[in-house]
Image: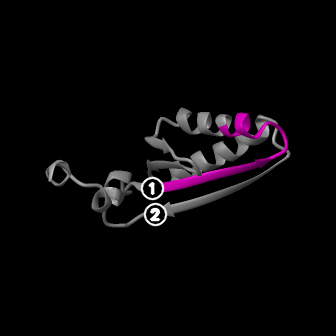
Amino acid sequence: MPKAVMAVQVIPHGGKVYDIVDQAIAAIERSGLPYEVTPFETVVEGEREELLAVARAAHEACFEAGAKSVLTIIKLAERPDEDLTVAKILARYRPGPQEAAE
């Protein structure tokens, strides 16, 4: 199965929000999949089933860290015919070495 890209955002309520979000990110890190934390969400690369499992782990980590409730937003991008990566998605917006020198 081709690789996909997922953005996951956990919004915990109750408890120490930043500490709870840190635990959700730690759950993503334990997956071993490539990821990048951004100001509003974390972007992860992998196969669809792996990504959905990671989103679930991040969601559950919030409760384990003391959240009273959690809203988790998932955005999943995939193509059946090719691997997607963050680099591929952003390539058209980031100048290459030649363009940056100009």
- Mark 2: secondary structure: strand
| Residue at the image position 47 percent from the left and 42 percent from the top | 35
From where the camera sits, is residue 17 visible?
yes
Q: Position of residue 20 (x, y in %)?
A: 73, 37
The residue beneath circle 1 is: 5
Residue 26 colored magenta?
no
Magenta span covers which residues? 5-21
Outermost residue toward the bottom in this view: 80
Q: Position of residue 88 (x, y in %)?
A: 31, 57
| Residue at the image position 59 percent from the left and 51 percent from the top | 40
The amino acid sitting under disc 1 is Val
Q: Position of residue 47 (x, y in %)?
A: 44, 52
Q: Nearer the viewer, residue 74 or 48?
A: 74
Quadrant of the rendered image containing residue 93: bottom left
Q: Nearer the viewer, residue 3 or 24?
A: 24
Above or below residue 36? Residue 79 is below
| Residue at the image position 53 percent from the left and 35 percent from the top | 29
| Residue at the image position 60 percent from the left and 59 percent from the top | 74
Q: Is residue 24 left or right of residue 36?
A: right
Q: Nearer the viewer, residue 37 or 79?
A: 37
- Tell me the tag on residue 77: 2
Between the C-alphas of marks 2 and 1, the distance is 5 Å
Outermost residue toward the front in this view: 102
Q: Is residue 32 left or right of residue 21?
A: left
Q: Is residue 77 left or right of residue 22?
A: left
The amino acid sitting under disc 2 is Ala
- Tell me the tag on residue 81: none
- Mark 1: secondary structure: strand
